[in-house]
Image (cartoon, rainbow, N blue to C red):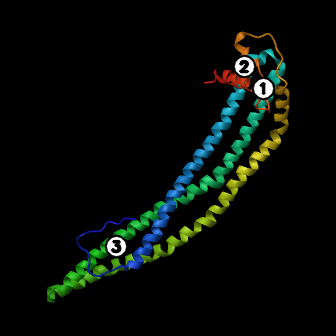
Amino acid sequence: MSWIHFKIGQPKKQIVPKTVERDFEREYGKLQQLEDQIKKLHKDMKKSTEADVAMSKSAVKISSDLLTNPLCDQDQKFMESVTALDTAMRRMDAFNQEKVNQIQKTTIEPLKKFSNVFPSLNMAVKRREQTLQDYKRLQSKVEKYEEKEKSGHVVVKLHQAKEELRPVREDFEAKNKQLLEEMPKFYNSRIDYFQPSFEALIRAQKKLPYKSAEKLRPTCIAVSSELSLGVSKPQRTPACSSLTSAPILPPQDGTDPASARWRQSCLHKMAPIP
């Protein structure tokens, strides 16, 4: 942390012990680092949830686009399978949105609330620094009169300078003491504050996917069973010929030569999607 020191008006007397100033800079430096970490974590969490939402919405769009494929109008079984797939994707999207909402409430919002404390803290430190500069300026003024020959005029000016210095010194000492007491407390409070949030985040990442997988399992098994058998061959146009030349889902065995045809059919199927 860097402080702005003035070359003029600096007192000869050390008004703040070096150990006190080091303690202050150490505690404030820890909070500055914590502020940067909280901001970064908050930003990363928002990007993560936005990516989750975008992924599930993309899956819904793909299944929705498949429903509009001409092949669905020509093959009733294929229509039923794609409809089941679309239902599964929409349910998955709903489960994912539930997870995102939970993370928003239990993690992202507490992060934002915690970070809102730092502007007030930084302003308090700034006021403390401004008071310190006033303290040094007035202390230097007192020392200047103390070094002069004691005349009636100088004695009066010295008394006035001391009276002007007294409330500023008391104000600085109060601000400095309060910050030295409050900064360590605030820094140590981060553990108790964030522990419930991170526990909720872990539960959301762990529980909801299992929950959604369990409820979607029957649908996914039905779709996989139907599509693994391949689709029937209705009368079709050349445009959809390559679309039905291979199963929609890849075989479990990666060595099966149908894998290449499946990848080609997927690329062809998704090509019209904007």
Which quadrant would residue 96 be assigned to in this image? top right
Q: Where is residue 80 drawn, in percent x and y?
A: 82, 24
Q: Which residue is mark 3?
A: 132
The reply to whether discs 3 and 1 touch (Cβ–Cβ < 8 Å) is no
Tell me the amino acid under the disc marked 3.
Leu
Could you tell whether 21 is left or right of 153 in the image?
right
In the image, residue 147 sits, relative to residue 226, either above or below, namely below
The reply to whether discs 2 and 3 touch (Cβ–Cβ < 8 Å) is no
The quadrant of the rendering that contains the C terminus is top right
Could you tell me if residue 265 is visible in this image?
yes
Q: Residues within 10 Å of mark 2 (few under 14, many from 20)?
A: some
Q: Which residue is mark 1?
A: 82
Alpha-carbon span between mark 3 and mark 1:
72 Å
In the image, residue 144 sits, relative to residue 250, either above or below, namely below
Of discs 2 and 3, which sits in the foreground? 2
Q: Where is residue 49 drawn, in percent x and y?
A: 62, 45
